[in-house]
C-alpha cells in the first residue's frame, strides 16, 4: 500500500515483499505514519450497516481521533455521511466543528462549570450526567429564551460518570428539572461489551430500557464498537462506535472484521556488527550470544513506542519479524537484523501494520490497542490516503 500526501498523490510504492520504498520529498523522514481514510470510512459504513437500516451510527473522535488526527478524521466521515460525532472534552469538539459544520457534535464529559457560552457559540450538545449540569443547562436555555439540545447520560453500572440511580430517581420524580432542555437522546455506557458472555451486558440492557421508558420523547443511544456485535438487544436509535472505526478489533477473541487504518514505518538510520558478548543499549539489558547485526531506528517511547516493549516486541521487514533488542529509549530502538540480510541502511521497517497490528503490541506491553494508537506521538511524518 502506498504512502500518500493530503491531496492523494502517490509518494511511494511497496516492494513485492511488502517493504516500503519511500519516494522524494519524504525520503529523508525518519518515520512515517500512514492513515488510510478510505479504510476508516469503510469501517464506519460497515458498522452503520451492521447497526441496521433506519438507525443512525455516530463516530467517537476522542483523543485526537484515537491519535490519528481528529480534524482529518471528522472531515472524511462527514463527507461520507456521518452526522453524529462525539468527543470527550469541550475543546476537542470546538477544534473539529469546522470539519463537520452541521453535525450533532456532542461532548461526553458533559457541561463543565462556566462552559455554557462555549457550548452555545459552537452549537455543541452536552451529555448531561448530573443534576447540577441539568440545572445549569436549563438556566442557560432560560437566559437565551429558547430550548437547548442535550443528551441525558445515565449510569447503568459503570459507576464513573452519568446520573446515579439516586439522582435519576429525583429527576423522574421532578421532571420539571428538564424544562428548557431539548432532550435528544438518553445514553449509557457498556461496562464489558468486549466480553460477549458477561452477565453485566444484559443487565445493563434491561436497566437502560427501563430508564429510557421514563423519557419517551427522547431517542436512545446505546452500543459502542463492541456493543454493535452483541446482537439486537443492543441496537438503538444511535450507536457510537469509536475504536473499531480505527481498525481496532471489537471482538477480541475472533478475527478482526475491521480494516486496518494506521501503518507506522521507521527507517534504518545505522547498522553495526557486534561480536558475541557485546551488549546493546542502556544497562546491558541484552547481550549478543552470537555475532550480530544491529539496526537502529529513530523511534522511541517519546513517540508512543512503550518502554514496556523492551525485550518483547519485534518490527517487520517484508513480513519477517526482527526482534527489538536492548532497552527502548526515548528516541531510538535497536533491532536484531542478523537473519534479515535485506534490511540495509536506509530501508524501511514496519512498526505497526499488517504483520504487527496494534493488538500484538498491546498484548506485549500489557495494555490495550486503544493505548497503542492514542499514544502515537507528533514527530512522525504523517501522510493521509484520502477516502
Image: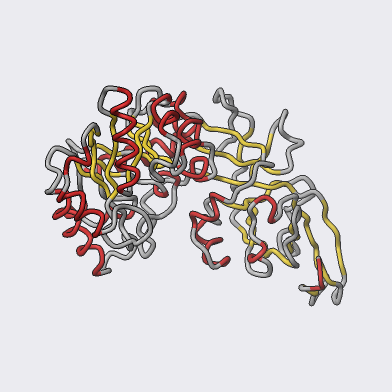
Residue 87 position (above or below residue 193) = above
Point out residue 311 in the picture as x, y percentages from the top left corner: 68, 70
Q: Residue at x 68, y 37 (%)?
A: 22
User: What colouring does the structure picture have?
Assistant: secondary structure
| Along the line of sight, the residue nearer the viewer: 123 or 61 | 123
| Along the line of sight, the residue nearer the viewer: 136 or 39 | 136
Q: Residue at x 37, y 41 (%)?
A: 43
Point out residue 31 in the picture as x, y percentages from the top left corner: 69, 43
Q: Residue at x 74, y 35 (%)?
A: 27
Q: Viewed as shown, does residue 25 lie left or right of 235?
A: right
Point out residue 362 in the picture as x, y percentages from the top left corner: 53, 62
Quarter of the image with the N terminus in it = top right
Quarter of the image with the C terminus in it = top left
Residue 78 position (above or below residue 203) = above
Residue 41 position (above or below residue 366) = above
Query: Does any portion of residue 82 appear in the rendered image?
Result: no
Point out residue 227 in the picture as x, y percentages from the top left corner: 29, 54
Q: Residue at x 73, y 66 (%)?
A: 325
Q: Viewed as shown, does residue 357 lie left or right of 378?
A: left
Q: Viewed as shown, does residue 207 lie left or right of 305?
A: left
Amino acid at each position: 500500500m502506498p504512502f500518500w500526501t493530503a491531496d492523494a498523490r502517490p509518494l511511494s510504492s511497496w516492494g513485492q515483499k511488502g517493504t516500503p520504498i519511500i519516494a522524494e520529498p519524504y525520503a529523508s523522514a525518519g518515520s512515517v505514519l500512514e492513515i488510510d481514510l478510505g479504510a476508516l470510512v469503510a469501517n464506519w459504513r460497515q458498522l452503520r450497516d451492521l447497526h441496521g437500516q433506519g438507525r443512525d451510527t455516530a463516530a467517537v473522535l476522542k483523543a485526537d481521533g484515537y491519535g490519528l488526527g481528529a480534524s482529518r478524521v471528522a472531515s472524511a466521515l462527514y463527507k461520507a455521511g456521518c452526522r453524529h460525532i462525539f468527543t470527550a472534552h469541550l475543546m476537542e469538539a470546538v477544534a473539529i466543528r469546522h470539519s463537520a459544520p452541521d453535525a450533532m457534535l456532542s461532548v461526553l464529559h458533559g457541561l463543565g462549570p462556566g462552559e455554557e457560552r462555549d457550548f452555545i457559540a459552537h452549537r455543541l450538545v452536552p451529555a448531561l450526567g448530573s443534576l447540577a449540569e441539568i440545572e445549569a443547562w436549563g438556566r442557560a436555555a432560560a437566559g437565551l429564551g429558547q430550548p437547548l439540545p442535550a443528551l441525558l447520560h445515565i449510569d447503568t453500572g459503570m459507576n464513573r460518570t452519568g446520573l446515579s440511580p439516586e439522582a435519576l430517581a429525583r429527576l423522574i420524580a421532578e421532571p420539571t428539572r428538564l424544562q428548557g432542555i431539548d432532550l435528544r437522546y438518553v445514553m449509557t455506557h457498556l461496562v464489558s461489551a468486549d466480553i460477549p458472555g458477561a452477565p453485566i451486558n444484559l443487565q445493563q440492557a434491561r436497566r437502560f430500557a427501563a430508564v429510557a421508558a421514563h423519557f419517551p420523547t427522547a431517542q436512545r443511544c446505546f452500543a459502542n464498537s463492541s456493543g454493535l456485535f452483541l446482537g439486537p438487544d443492543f441496537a438503538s436509535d444511535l450507536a457510537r462506535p469509536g475504536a473499531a472505526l480505527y481498525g481496532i478489533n471489537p471482538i477480541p477473541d475472533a478475527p478482526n472484521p475491521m480494516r486496518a487504518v494506521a501503518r507506522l514505518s521507521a527507517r534504518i538510520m545505522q547498522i553495526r556488527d557486534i561480536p558475541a558478548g557485546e551488549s546493546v543499549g542502556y544497562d546491558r539489558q541484552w547481550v549478543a550470544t552470537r555475532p550480530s547485526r544491529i539496526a537502529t531506528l529513530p523511534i522511541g517511547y517519546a513517540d508512543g513506542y512503550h518502554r514496556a516493549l523492551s525485550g518483547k516486541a519485534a518490527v517487520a521487514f517484508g513480513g519477517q519479524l526482527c526482534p527489538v533488542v536492548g532497552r527502548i529509549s526515548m528516541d531510538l530502538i535497536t533491532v536484531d537484523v542478523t537473519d534479515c540480510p535485506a534490511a540495509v541502511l536506509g530501508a524501511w521497517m514496519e512498526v505497526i501494520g499488517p504483520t504487527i497490528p496494534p493488538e500484538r503490541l498491546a498484548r506485549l506491553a500489557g495494555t490495550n490497542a486503544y493505548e497503542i494508537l492514542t499514544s502515537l506521538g507528533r514527530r512522525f511524518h504523517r501522510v493521509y490516503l484520502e477516502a
